[in-house]
């Protein structure tokens, strides 16, 4: 049976053969190195370059036994003179290499041991780029960061923290005492207590807003601080990291908004008082006018009843007085109704708007049977509103359209509903003479009427009443019209 050979043992190259074979064996070591290895003597002559250094030597324009570039000669001479290792970085064929230069002084040459650092360089560049972006982001946001190492009691601030505090970045080594000196004197105790209490009571951190006094110009600014603690296995805090955010601009805007709100509230109260006084005045005047007006109207009517000849000038004057007092009474009633709208409580419920339009149209036809007007409206229109007030809106808008609708058999009033910007929007449209909307900016103000409406009956209170009711429902009302093309009034009723 054949002998099984023993497991191969390491070969001692000194016993492997001749000296020539031993030298050849040793020479394989630098040749098999995947990174460049070179040797340059004190005169700059390239004594040796392994296979991995072939492209580098080509780039330098030299081969073994030839002069290397001047910068290599200078590096070699410096290394031999100082008799210590040096580092050299160079680029070859799109790759970055770092060489450790080891001087062999007694033999007058320097060995170059290289390694490819391209990936490391790219990583370093990416990190530097990100760090630059991070610093720029902190600068833009006026937000700095800090870290306190409680093991060795060292505090570090980012560049933006220095800037926020009115200092040059990295002007000096940061410390907690300097930070407290920058804190506004009136806030210093609360800031210090916030930090120490979070440590003593085992909290995970703290958050506080306070003032600082900038070192460069003494300006008082507001900052928002937030800190987080990190603990070791013994639950001892060993590190704290935090941020400092300059919120002065935000605080300034908050203060401006607070002042504006206070002013608005004050003006709103003044306006409410003024409106109350005006409405009380209107109500009082209207009531005070009623009594003398009733007396005038009563006596004038008694005298008019005794007139037998309508052609008599005295009788005609009496008739005009009676008609005038009746109009004045109607105006007073309209003013009282308008004033009461400010105090009426809104009772919202689902209202059949189509039924209201049908009822109002029937009342108008009954009151003015000679006018041949077609009132068109959609069935099934419903809205969440106060029914009594909505009836006033319909009466005024449909009544207006009835008055101004075109003459003859072609007169039409149209009431409908559509969705505009996802909101139920109602419209009342007529085919009357229309009006110049550009000249009717105050159309919904009391006693304001569109140009061309002067010959029609009314006091100019109706559209103001509609506007007040619609606004009390949280909606809005507007008009669209052109001369000769009729008019359309739109309204919404909010939630």
Image (tube, rainbow, N blue to C red):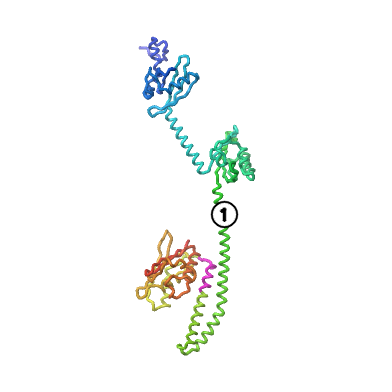
Residue 360 x, y percent position in the rendering: 43, 73
Disc 1 is placed on an element classified as helix
Q: Is residue 391 above or below residue 206?
A: below
Left or right of residue 198: residue 417:
left
The residue at the point 54 percent across, 48 percent down is 249
Q: Check if residue 346 falls in the magenta segment.
A: yes
The quarter of the displayed image where residue 144 is located = top right
Count of residue discs: 1
The quarter of the displayed image where residue 191 is located = top right
**Residue bearing the label numbered 1:** 258
Q: Is residue 381 visible?
A: no
Residues drawn in magenta: 334-347
Q: Is residue 336 above or below residue 32?
A: below
Seen from the viewer's position, the closer of residues 416 and 250 is: 250
Residue 70 x, y percent position in the rendering: 42, 22
Residue 376 x, y percent position in the rendering: 38, 70
Q: Quadrant of the N terminus?
A: top left
The residue at the point 57 percent across, 54 percent down is 258
């Amino acid at each position: 049976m054949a002998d099984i050979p023993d497991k191969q043992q390491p070969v001692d190259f000194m016993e492997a053969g001749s000296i020539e074979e031993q030298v050849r064996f040793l020479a394989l070591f630098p040749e098999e190195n995947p990174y460049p290895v070179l040797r340059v003597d004190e005169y700059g002559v390239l004594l040796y370059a392994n296979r991995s250094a072939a492209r580098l030597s080509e780039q330098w324009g030299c081969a073994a036994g030839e002069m290397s570039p001047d910068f290599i000669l200078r590096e070699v001479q410096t290394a031999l003179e100082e008799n210590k290792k040096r580092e050299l970085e160079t680029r070859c064929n799109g790759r970055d290499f770092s060489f450790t230069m080891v001087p062999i002084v007694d033999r007058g040459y320097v060995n170059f041991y290289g390694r490819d650092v391209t990936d490391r360089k790219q990583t370093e560049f990416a990190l530097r780029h990100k760090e630059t972006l991070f610093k720029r982001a902190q600068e833009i946001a006026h937000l700095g960061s800090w870290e306190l190492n409680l093991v060795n009691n060292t505090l570090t601030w980012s560049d933006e923290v220095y800037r926020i505090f009115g200092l040059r970045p990295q002007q000096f080594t940061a410390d907690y005492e300097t930070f407290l000196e920058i804190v506004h004197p009136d806030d210093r105790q609360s800031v210090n207590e916030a930090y120490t209490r979070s440590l003593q009571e085992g909290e995970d951190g703290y958050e506080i807003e306070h003032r600082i006094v900038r070192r460069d110009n003494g300006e008082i600014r507001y900052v928002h601080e937030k800190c987080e603690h990190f603990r070791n296995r013994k639950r001892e805090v060993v590190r704290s990291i935090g941020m400092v955010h300059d919120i002065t601009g935000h605080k300034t805007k908050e203060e401006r908004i607070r002042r504006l709100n206070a002013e608005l509230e004050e003006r709103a109260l003044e306006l409410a008082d003024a409106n109350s006084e005006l409405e009380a005045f209107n109500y009082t005047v209207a009531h005070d006018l009623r009594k003398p007006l009733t007396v005038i109207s009563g006596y004038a009517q008694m005298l008019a009843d005794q007139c037998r000849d309508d052609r008599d000038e005295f009788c005609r004057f009496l008739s005009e007085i009676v008609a005038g007092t009746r109009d004045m009474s109607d105006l007073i009633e309209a003013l009282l109704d308008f004033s009461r709208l400010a105090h009426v409580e809104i009772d919202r419920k689902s209202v059949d708007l189509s039924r209201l339009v049908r009822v109002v149209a029937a009342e108008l036809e009954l009151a003015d049977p000679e006018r041949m007007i077609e009132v068109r409206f959609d069935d099934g229109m419903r809205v969440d509103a106060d029914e009594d007030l909505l009836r006033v809106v319909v009466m005024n808008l449909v009544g207006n359209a009835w008055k101004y609708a075109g003459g003859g058999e072609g007169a039409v009033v149209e009431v409908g509903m559509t969705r505009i910007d996802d909101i139920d929007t109602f419209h009342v449209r007529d085919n009357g003479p229309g009006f110049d909307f550009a000249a009717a900016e105050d159309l919904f103000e009391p006693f304001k009427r569109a140009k061309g409406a002067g010959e029609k009956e009314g006091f100019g209170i109706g559209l103001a009443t509609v506007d007040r009711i619609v606004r009390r429902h949280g909606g809005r009302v507007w008009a669209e019209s052109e001369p000769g093309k009729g008019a359309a009034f739109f309204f919404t009723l909010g939630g």
